[in-house]
Amino acid sequence: MNKTRSALLAIGAFLLTNLKWVLGLLKFSKFGTTLLSMALSLGAYAMFYGWKFAAALVYLIFVHEMGHVIAARQKGIATSPAVFIPFAGAFIAMKDHPRDASTEAYLAYGGPLAGMLAFLPALPLYWWTQDPFWALVIYLGALLNLFNLLPVSPLDGGRIVSVLSTKIWLIGLIGLGAMLFARPGPIMVFIFILGLVTWWNRAREGYKKQVLAYEKEKLHTLLETMAGWPQLESTWETRESLNAKHLEAAKKKAPEGFAIPFLQDEKRFAKDRVRLDKLFAEQTWELFRKWEREPMEFYDYERTQPVPSRLLTEAEKQARERIAQIDELLHRLTTYYEAPASTKWKVLVAYLGLAAVLSVFFVYAQQLLQIR
């Protein structure tokens, strides 16, 4: 252990003194981030568990992540390079969001599938050499990928079963909570919290759609209001009307107190309505005041051909862009998790099949290690 630490300290000192050179070299490599983070993880694992164990673990994690990368490329989704985090595994980030849960499940499945293929060569190596190290590789590979198949988002299993039903996430959270109670650990706590947040966001999507629909309604009202301003012969009545609406909205009071989600969503929605009413009344009033002060321009100085207001043109553009964003969000919230029955059956069979095979290897490796 002392020798290992000394070696690692020497490597660390070298890297620190030559950091600029190392980063300059890695900059030219597409996988520079992956290589550097992999080396750091390898050293960290080796410090506590030895080089053989560290090399096996980093190899298994790397192949698992490459399974995600290959699956993403097959679906035309760009990803970041794999980044290793010592004692926390590794991750890749998607630069594009999958179009539906079925695509996301395909990307998620690629990791555990590649992870299983990664430790298969250890089987003949163990049979040939009888070295318990290869049994350990089988055990680690099966364990890591089985854990990733837990039906908890953001683990791979949670993303896979989302095609079947996101209600399964709650069952997975209960199971993970039991595991956490029996054997607590910081990584499991982190995953449990992320899973709880993801499940909660999914459970509240119905309410989000309601608020987004109301915001979209207010945006259309704003567009209709702005469209009539250039045709006004006198702005006095419109000014008085908008000012009155602005003052009335400012006086509105939202229901007081905390609104319990699900049980008191009407009260919560009333709060959101008041908030949006105030926001749009203020924006409309301020926009009108600025528009009134905006100098009027004409084509070729002909007073019969006014140039459209730049202020209103920009405001209309922003409103329509926000409406397009809301439409996209509403579409995703409504259709993202929809899938035909045939797809659901395929996903179910693939998920259970991979979990069963990994379980067999896990039990087999346990028996080999107990024998040794």
Image (cartoon, grey):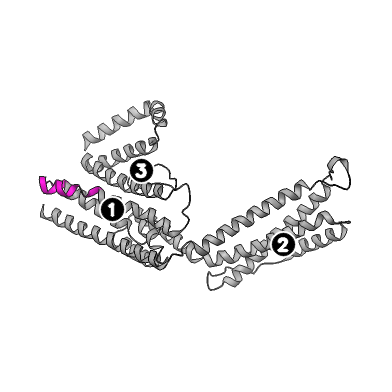
Q: Amino acid at mark 3?
A: Phe
Which residue is the site of mark 2? 221
Q: Residue furthest bottom?
A: 263
- The CA span between labels 1 and 3 is 15 Å
Q: Amino acid at mark 1?
A: Leu
Q: Position of residue 289 (x, y in %)?
A: 80, 52
- The CA span between labels 2 and 1 is 54 Å
Magenta range:
118-133
User: Which quarter of the figure has residue 43?
Assistant: top left
- Neighbourhood count class around disc 1 (C-alpha, 10 Å): few under 14, some 14–19, many 20 upward: many
Q: Is 307 left, or right, of 157 in this rendering?
A: right
Say whether residue 103 is visible.
yes
Of the 4 image quadrants, the one containing the N terminus is top left
Which residue is the site of mark 1? 144
- Answer with mark 2 or mark 1, whichever residue precedes in sequence: 1
- The CA span between labels 2 and 3 is 50 Å
